[in-house]
Amino acid sequence: MAEAIDIRELNVRIEQQSGFVTNLVTGMDRVIVGQKHLVDSLLIGLLSDGNILLEGVPGLAKTLAIKTLSQLIDATYSRIQFTPDLLPADVTGTMIYSQKDEKFQVKQGPVFANFVLADEINRAPAKVQSALLEAMQEKQVTIGSETFNLPNPFLVMATQNPIEQEGTYPLPEAQMDRFMLKVVIGYPTIDEEKKIIRENIAGALPKVTPVTTADEIIKAREVVREVYIDEKIEQYIADIVFATRYPDRYGLKDMKDMISFGGSPRASINLAKAARAYAFIKRRGYVVPEDVRAVAHDVLRHRIGLTYEAEASNVTSEDIVSKIINKVEVP
């Protein structure tokens, strides 16, 4: 019975804390037409302290969505445009010799902000992409011999164009794994497209003013951490991730030759965190299997390595995740 009271009390606290979610969604809707899934994913990343990678062809409002979100929150924001000639020091910062003091001084780079937009991240070579690794995982940056902590909250939101496009470098696996979610964005519906045309030819985009602060987000994250995950749900999450590693154990023998490597333990951690944040957005104090299913594609699609056989058979990681979700037993 204690559990039931606990959940009820938690639901009340979630109601109190999640007011700003509605404000953020309303603010996003004023600027972004449609793209509900994109907005939800950005909120999940924000609430569970996870980095987000958005993929889609140019012109689908990826950069606009991230920029709008950071304007709605009263926090620092910086944008790094990745290009083939960008250097790691352009991202993290460098040592500059000061003639006045006759010593080297640290000049911090654009990565020192609450929200970092890494625009077109796959246009820069791997050495630059790797400059973000330490920042994304350890929330710190080493310049020369000194290590600096990054501000809290710290979130990297990266956009990329699909790999098939000209002049792109695929992201290294280690980098991919550090993104909590990889969200693939599709085209708007015809009604949304008409609304986009109407709003753009009318002239000015609505002015965005902050509706919440960084401190409020940190408080909300503490409540998200208390969202209850039952043992059965934990088992369900572990089963889904294990099915990406050992598909034959879950009756998916035909998948064995398609997967070169499955999800790392980071996949399980992020699946649980994202499901929690999703439950919070839905104003619930506990996680249900539907929450896990709702975030599974975004959490897992970039963590499954495909074999040549899969590529030859036109099997995508998307198909594999769908098959696994349909096959693994729901508690």
Image: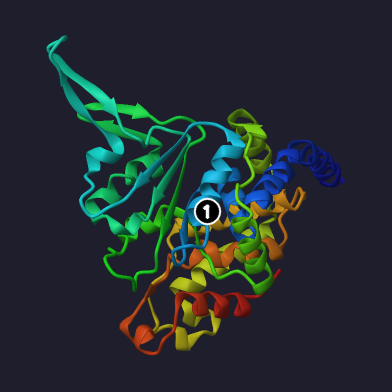
Q: Which residue is rendered at x = 74% and y = 37% of the image?
A: 17
Residue 311 vertical position relative to residue 227 in the rendered view, above or below: below
Q: Which residue is rendered at x = 16% and y = 9% of the image?
A: 101
Q: Position of residue 240 (x, y in %)?
A: 56, 69
In the rendered structure, the answer to whether residue 288 lies left or right of residue 204 reads: right
Q: For this rendering, which residue is in front, 139 or 188?
A: 188
**Res. 297 image quadrant:** bottom right
Q: Give amino acid for label 1.
A: Ile
Q: Which residue is rendered at x = 62% and y = 35% of the image?
A: 217
Q: Position of residue 89 (x, y in %)?
A: 23, 38
Give the residue at mark 1.
269
Q: Position of residue 103 (x, y in %)?
A: 14, 15
Residue 301 vertical position relative to residue 95 in the rendered view, above or below: below
Q: For this rendering, which residue is in front, 8 or 298?
A: 298
**Res. 274 image quadrant:** bottom right
Q: Secondary structure at mark 1?
A: helix
Q: Position of residue 68 (x, y in %)?
A: 57, 45
The residue at the far front in this view is 202
* Residue 34 visible in this rendered orientation of the protein: no
Instruction: Quadrant for the C terminus, please.
Output: bottom right
In the rendered structure, the answer to whether residue 330 lies left or right of residue 45 reads: right
Q: Residues within 10 Å of mark 1 (few under 14, many from 20)?
A: some
In the rendered structure, the answer to whether residue 197 lies left or right of residue 82 reads: right
* Residue 66 visible in this rendered orientation of the protein: yes
Residue 259 vertical position relative to residue 239 in the rendered view, above or below: below
